[in-house]
Image (tube, rainbow, N blue to C red):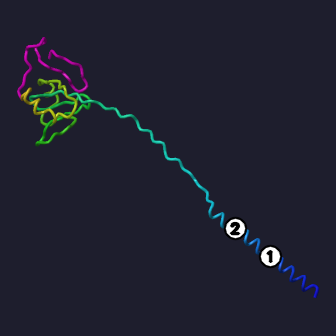
Amino acid sequence: MNNKSLFLKNNNVRFALSTVLLMALAACAGSASGQGVAITIPPPVVVVAPSVVVQDDYVYYPNYGVYYSTSHHRYAYQENGAWVSRPAPRGVSVDVLLASPSVKMNFHDAPANHHAAVLQQYPKNWKPSASKPGGKDDQKNDRPGDHAENNGR
């Protein structure tokens, strides 16, 4: 009988130890779920290049109603009632256009904003007057790729 009481005492101790161990594991598991591994990825660095604003300078060819942007190397004119901008004018060769009278404009935005006033000052068959030295008035020889002023064309 003595062995029986020892067995019961051992069984109670085992039960108590098992209970304590189970509670410890449950506590660890409960706290482990609250703890996570955080992976922090920093946002990418975005470098924005400073914008360069180039003002348009235009040369107007009154005989053809065509403007040439010296900064963008494009021609602007009306086509079927709408303003277009192209690398070459339609309906006239660049050589013929460059051989015609031209005037350097003093505005730096879209020709459409000034075209009505430009038409009044420089009608379709406008020719420079001979009042200035060199025989030409407000003339600029501004061919694509050649941006030097030439008042004596």
Tell me the SS state at disc 1: helix
Q: Residue at x 78, y 75 (%)?
A: 18
Residue located beneath label 2 in the image: 27
Up the image or down, 4 lies above or below 75; here it is: below
Q: Is residue 128 covered in magenta?
A: yes
Residue type at the position of mark 1: Ala
Q: Quadrant of the N terminus?
A: bottom right
Residue assigned mark 1: 16
Compared to 9, does 20 lie above or below?
above
Q: Is residue 119 left or right of residue 21?
A: left
Marks 1 and 2, the one that precedes in the sequence: 1
Q: Which residues are magenta?
A: 124-153
Farthest residue to the right: give it.
Answer: 2
Q: Is residue 5 left or right of residue 34?
A: right
Rendering coords of residue 13 (x, y %): 84, 77
Location of residue 150 by image quarter: top left
**Label 2 amino acid?**
Ala
